[in-house]
Amino acid sequence: MTQPSAPPRPRPPGPGADVRLHYEFGAPGQRGATLGNPLIELLIAVRDAGSIGRAAAQLGCSYRYAWGSLRKWEDTLGEALVTWTQGQPAQLTDFGQRLLWAELRARTRLQPQIDALRADLARVLDEARDARQQVLPLHASHDLALPRLREHAAQQSALHLDIRFMGSIDCLRSLNAGRCLVAGFHVPALSGAAPLFAAALKPLLHPGEHKLIGCARRSQGLMTRREHAGRLHGVADLPQAGLRFVNRQPGSGTRLLMDHLMQAQGLQSTQIAGYDSCVEESHVAVAASIASGAADAGLGVEAAALEFGLHFLPLVQEDYFLACLKQNLEQPAVLRLRDLLTGRAWAEMLAALPGYRPAAAPGQVLVMTSALPWWRYTRPKAGARQPGLTAGSGD
């Protein structure tokens, strides 16, 4: 853009500008492939009005604001957009014309997708106004079944599971800090002691304050490419197999499980290549790392191994629990979730996922000292109930 009767201001070569998208709520009436882009709206107004002043009036802003906006966009893009001289109409530069033409062509080409996106985003506002909709913040250890549960909950129960995946320990800390309503974590189905799990989870779960809900049971084991299938028969073979191990992040339930299995075999992390240096944060990421050749073995769920065509050696069955505070057990969103977990559809979804099956008591509230067999009181509580299931008020 130029001052009256002045040559165009020199521009340094522009590095290019990022395309950033955003949307906002406004009064009804916008239709078609119209997108809110202040620069494009200003260029159209200048082109049609032939004057920055008239363009500003058409857009309902001041001349100073329009002029400043053009200067700002020219600095951002590294190109002149408008040129005008004394007594002549303002005109778009060649770059300004090409930018406007490309934008309008893109809008026309993308009209069906833009209309569909607008409709989807409009439902955001409609759902927020619908008091029947419930949102449940759920921080959970990574699991392949939970995204399916999220879709099922939204379709069948107007329940929106706001899932954030993180390690089991971080999930329970989030629950205790009030950052989520429900936390998902998993522990091996062991009949004996598991000191690593007890040490990590006991400080975060308090009988009487926290409640456990049955969710699923799944199989965890070693994943390898098929050419390495005969080299591993258990965790004890890892040091001699010479395979690069990809681990899960510290604080995750799967990392705790691996540490537990190694402790049972008397192994040290230094005996396994990559144990502390190669880390991923989901079962899928571990499987992808192995499939790509970046690593050779890792611990994960069977469904992730089969998704990437890997060999799977089952090692343990584990229970995936949902925890919430006792005071929130009767919250409408939690009750809807419990109802979904008891339903036939959830059982069928788990049956269709390799290595998964329903929990022993899906959707039921469990006695913590029974559900977690490695949890034992040093002395029996006076008047304590026998381990088992309760309708919602057990230890």
Image (cartoon, grey):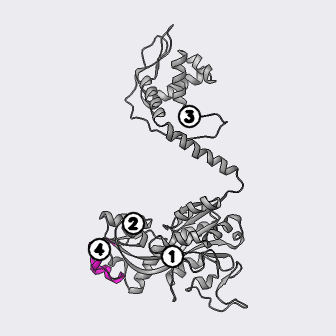
Residue 209: x and y, percent?
Answer: 68, 76
Identify which amino acid the numbered label 3 is placed on. Gly
Q: CA distance from mark 3 to mark 2?
A: 40 Å
Residue 348: x and y, percent?
Answer: 53, 71
Side of 308 where 81 appears, left or right = right
Side of 165 where 231 appears, left or right = left
Q: Please report the bounds of the magenta region as a residue range.
A: 224-242
User: Do the CB atoms of the residues marked 2 and 4 lie less than 8 Å apart?
Assistant: no
State the SS at label 4.
Answer: loop
State the SS at label 3.
Answer: loop
Q: Which residue is mark 1?
A: 357
Look at the picture and state if 102 lies above or below 302: above
- Of the image marks 2 and 1, the number of the one nearer the N terminus: 2
Q: Residue furthest top?
A: 87
Look at the picture and state if 193 lies above or below 329: below
Marks 2 and 4: which is nearer the front? Answer: 2
Q: CA distance from mark 1 to mark 3?
A: 47 Å
User: Do the CB atoms of the residues marked 2 and 1 lie less than 8 Å apart?
Assistant: no
Identify which amino acid the numbered label 4 is placed on. Leu
Identify which amino acid the numbered label 1 is placed on. Arg
Q: Which residue is mark 4?
A: 243
Q: CA distance from mark 1 to mark 4?
A: 31 Å
**Which image quadrant: the C terminus?**
bottom right
Q: CA distance from mark 2 to mark 1?
A: 17 Å
Q: Which residue is mark 2?
A: 307
- Of the image marks 2 and 4, the number of the one nearer the N terminus: 4
Marks 4 and 3: which is nearer the front? Answer: 3
Q: Which residue is mark 3?
A: 32
State the SS at label 1.
Answer: strand
Residue under the point 62% across and 19% down: 57
Residue density around tag 3, few if under 14, some if 14–19, many if 20 or more, within 10 Å: few
